[in-house]
Amino acid sequence: MGRRAKKKQGEPEPLLISSRANPRARKSPKEKASGEKKRKLGDITDITTDGQEIERKTSKKVKATSDEKDLGKKFVKKPKNEATKLSNTTESNIKRQKTKISSGNYDTKNGSENGSNTKIPETSGIIRHIGLCADDDSDDGDSEVSETCRFLLDSSIWSQYTNGLIGGAHLLLYQKLYLDIEEKSRILDEEKRKEAELADDELQTNIEQTEKFTLPVNQDTEEGQTVTPDLQVVNQRIQDIVGVLNNFKKLGDEKRGRSAYVEQLIKDMTVYYGYSEFLLEKLFHLFSVSEAIEFFEANEISRPVTIRANTLRTRRRDLAQALINRGVSLEPTGKWTKVGLTVFNSSIPIGATPEYLAGHYMLQSASSFLPVIALAPQENEKILDMASAPGGKTTYIAALMKNTGIIFANDSNKERTKGLVANVHRLGVKNVVVSNYDGREFPSVTGGFDRVLLDAPCSGTGIISRDPAVKISKTDKDFKILSHLQKELILSAIDSVDARSSTGGYIVYSTCSVTVDENEEVVNYALKKRPNVKLVPTGLDFGQEGFTKYRGKNFHSSLKLTKRYYPHVHNMDGFFVSKFKKFSNTFSKSNDDDKTENVNDTTNDKNGGAKEIDKGTSNATNKAPKDKSMKARQKNSKEGETKKL
Ligand SMILES: C[S@@+](CC[C@H](N)C(=O)[O-])C[C@H]1O[C@@H](n2cnc3c(N)ncnc32)[C@H](O)[C@@H]1O
């Protein structure tokens, strides 16, 4: 199913990717994984899917800017702009000229060459030239005069002239000399340009007539070789393969098949971007080939720094003004948030301003606002933030609740709860209880919540630009362990909510990962195991729909209500957000009704939060169904400590 997202009002500004703005030297995979920057891959245009079952074949960027459209044309050689060339040439001539003068070949004092005393008489012509120099600011387009004047001014000769230290005759001499050199240089440059053009033409002719990209056999590639792969060669091959896949009928080798090209492409991208082959392939299949390149490229570029104004302490407008006064350049993050500010430049450390220390803002990635907006906490509710450290979302929830009600901010990692406690204090949050349980122990610890946020522990494939170690550190086993934990946590989260809540009854599940096994598969599992919940719209008016099918797997059709965010599309960390409504506290095993019903009970109040109308879906008893293995899980809990702080 092709699903090109339309740009909606309020979507964040688009990703601006420019290789020219981000020149990156190629490094070894290890260096790259440790954060080294690299050059862009180029000349990638739209192509069809590789024949694997990929539901999302294409994905439209929020707003295709010319930079985005140019993404694939980065390494296309363009002839140098003639004006630039001329200017460069002139500048180098000026340098040469200056050297010559200072090296004593000219007797500037006497205005003669090689120190001879030949006098140059002043003429009206000289005066005319000087006049032209004087109003050179007018940008008259006469590059000779313009550059000549620059030369004169640069070498202080003009000031010497105006101070009466040298006469107009000297100026003429310099002018003449400059123009001679300029002329010779221009002739040489022109010759060189013609030669280069001829060579290019020849090359082009050869390519057109004889060269067709041939997929190498294994021993021709870098695999198995001990030498460091030549990344330029790898990059070229990536471009070639994408070109072939774009037009396989005409350019491909039918005998070897499309899959052979895709296989080689994955291998080359692994080398070029510095991922383990396992992870690259896992992420590659989420996209069409050209979009995959965009995704991997976006992971090489940092996302903009964003901060969240803490409305418990200040207003965004006041905060922005205070920071601008300190030399920070920023602007509102997007229409979808009233509390986000994107920082472009700062002459001071943004994590150490008086405003930061006074708790006026939280340094927080834009995508991490999203689960809280989806949760839409209401004043005076009882809320569980099941995996909350270091508290970016907890403190946002508190601000939306205006410090009313109660938030249980839990995290199984005691060390991380220290940062959580510090943030709670700094931001003036007063409605939070911090606890240190394994989330799977809920609701035994306490239940009956109006809403639960499970911002689950995950692989971090959405934040590779921040943590490049993910590229090589995550194994198949890690993903299996993580998705198992996520499945257990999501059941606990659901079971901790009171379906009879008059204001809530909602569960938000989110991750900063883009893999299907940590997102759609977990949500689909929850829908199967807990037929007393259904997916509802997140209330987020941008983002791409979650998958309902993926590589042979079918998920519940309501999965389209979940939202995916990507660095290359939304210029924010990769994220997944889903929202459930619990409509009953009990359920029968056989109850696996159609949950496609679109319960649109969420309306954004455009204040970073949302107002919700409860549909009064259930009057069932408040007995949270227990997963069979709950007790066993509690016993086996390794990560959590069952001690309350
Ligand atoms: C994605 S981070 C949470 C970020 C947090 N929500 C925020 O906005 O600042 C996931 C958290 O889950 C915690 N965690 C891991 N396993 C857990 C478990 N079994 N129960 C509860 N928390 C767990 C980790 O310690 C980590 O702090």
Image: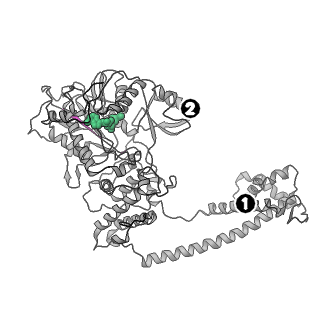
Q: Is residue 600 above or below residue 467?
A: above
- Which of the 4 image quadrants contains residue 436? top left
- Tell me if residue 102 can be seen: yes
Image location of residue 327, percent across then percent down: 57, 34
Q: Amino acid at mark 1?
A: Ile
Q: Give me the residue at 33% from left, 21% from top.
A: 431
Q: Give me the residue at 52% from left, 35% from top.
A: 349
Q: Which residues are magenta?
A: 572-584
Q: Which residue is mark 1?
A: 94
**Pointer 2 local density, CA inside 10 Å: few below 14, some 14–19, many at least 20:** few
Q: CA distance from mark 1 to mark 2?
A: 41 Å
Image location of residue 42, percent across then percent down: 44, 60
Q: Which residue is mark 2?
A: 326
Q: Amino acid at mark 2?
A: Arg
**Secondary structure of the magenta portion, mostly?**
strand
Magenta stretch containing residue 536, yes or no?
A: no
Magenta stretch containing residue 574, yes or no?
A: yes
Q: Are marks 1 and 2 in contact (CB under 8 Å)?
A: no
Q: Secondary structure at mark 2?
A: loop
Image location of residue 218, percent across then percent down: 33, 70
User: Would residue 634 appear left or right of 80 to someone viewing this image?
Assistant: left
The C terminus sits in image quarter: top left
Image location of residue 138, percent across then percent down: 72, 52
User: Would residue 246 appear left or right of 534 to someone viewing this image?
Assistant: right
